[in-house]
Amino acid sequence: MTSFSATQAHFPIMSSHCLIIGAGVIGLTTAYALLQRGHRVTLLDACREVGMGTSYANGGQLSYRYVAPLADAGVPLQALGWMLNRDSPLTFRPQLDLQQWRWCAAFIAACRRSVNQRNGQRLLQLALLSQQQLHLWQAQSPLADFSWRCNGKLVVYRRPQALSRAAASLVAPDSQQVLNRQQLLALEPSLAGMAEQLSGAIFTPGDEVGDCHLFCQALLGYLQQQTHFQLLEQCPVTALTQHAGQIQAIETDLGPLQADHYILTAGMGSYELAGALGLRLPLYPLKGYSLTLPLAEEAVAPHISVTDYERKMVYARLPATGTLPQRLRVAAMVDIGVQDTLITPRRIQSLRQQATASFPAAGDFAQAHSWAGLRPATPTGLPVIGATRWGNLWLNIGHGALGFTLACGSATLLAEQLSGQPASISLDGLTLGY
């Protein structure tokens, strides 16, 4: 595993007041990283509780070594085929929306193998930093149980050609294994029901799972014990005011609030706030869906996280906590051009049917809790972390489906930049060109 020289053991005491807009997993981890460096932090969110947006019921996988961007060679042609299938992993609903077409044009431009490989390596470095930071935070801070477990990850392939391509381009060959069908079933017997459809898998022992919403609550529990932290819930931000190249204040229902630094971590809400300043962020919402199925003792469900490569579905067994049973989290779908979080009956029914077909003895998926959320994504798949042309306005946005995986590393990079410290990894491709 790649190691990083940055340490959080000793930081100089800073006196800056940082105001973070958005209390999902990105905002909360950013608050943690800034507090560790001696800053005073105020965290705002429009919801009544932290982690209620994209962070609420995501896929649950911490896929540190499976972070390839969606944009890749062949994806546009493949997507055309998907759009003819009502149950495809991706749907596209064209809109009279300049933002959508700008994003799609940039996405197609990024669909080159060389670009995908370069950006994949950047994401890998950020993901490994994020894993290291999460483990460090777990060791340093009394975080509540968030169903974390290191159980490894299987990416299963139905087509032999897809498995061969994956085996030839492992992103972390020293920590990944190529398995044939027999080896796969020996490792994860719950896949027996779909065995005849599988060619093999890539196994990554070091990947993990966790409940992102519980992680948000665990972080908040720690943060609220800190003297220099304040949370303002149900406090929507309506505007940022600027003067002479600086943000002067933010406008809220509580009146104007001021700080030394302002950080946008509000997902798609960041797009609107920045747009009012004349800053066009490369974001677009990709709608996704999930199911959460409580698991009975006799349930036959995967213990290792599973990604069904061709169907673009992920399965994560979340361990029981003091108040929650074991759960199987199933997540899938990318709907482009749908900017609401309503449960689309056809899409969630398709998810239930495919989950039932894959793991028929896991339980009754008709009883699983359904959810939909908007993933704020950039065309390249790389998040935007760092400064803007306003000297005290910062961004930590655009993590797409990898927000939970990349959160701790992204927060560390943002806090390092704001504090004037050397970055733990290269920032190439991760900052905003302005």
Image (tube, rainbow, N blue to C red):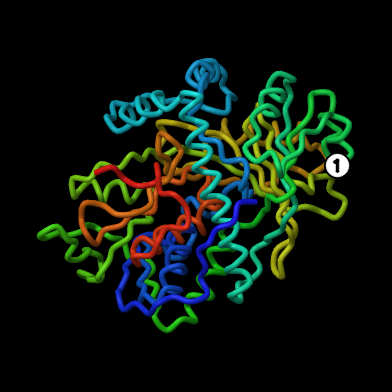
Quarter of the image where the C terminus is located: top left
* SS for dot 1: helix
Left or right, 242 with respect to 177, comes to left
Q: Position of residue 224 (x, y in %)?
A: 47, 78
Query: In this figure, which residue is indicated by the disc labeled 1?
Result: 187
In which quadrant of the rendered view does residue 181 lie? top right
- Between 1 and 297, the one lying in front of the other is 1
What residue sits 52% from the left and 32% below the top?
A: 117
> In which quarter of the view is residue 349 placed?
top right
| Quarter holding residue 307 | top right
Residue 305 seen in render:
no
Q: Residue at x 49, y 42 (%)?
A: 122
Q: Position of residue 190 (x, y in %)?
A: 84, 40
Q: Residue 422: x percent and y percent?
A: 40, 61
Q: Nearer the viewer, residue 345 or 176?
A: 176
Total marks placed: 1
- In the rendered image, is residue 25 in sight? yes
- Which residue is at a point 17% across and 61% down the rendered structure image? 246
Look at 40% across and 31% down and name the residue there: 337
Residue 130 sits above or below residue 77 on the image: below
Residue at the far bottom in the pictured view: 227
Picture layout, residue 34 above or below residue 278: below
278 lies above or below 105: below
Drawn side of residue 397 relative to residue 259, left or right: right
Q: Amino acid at mark 1?
A: Leu
Q: Is residue 248 above or below residue 156?
A: below
* 10 Å crowding of disc 1: few (<14), some (14-19), many (20+): some
Q: Image check: 197 left or right of 71?
A: right
Residue in front for this viewpoint, 48 or 153: 153
Residue that sits furthest to the front in the current view:
5
Residue 54 image position (x, y, % from top left): 48, 50
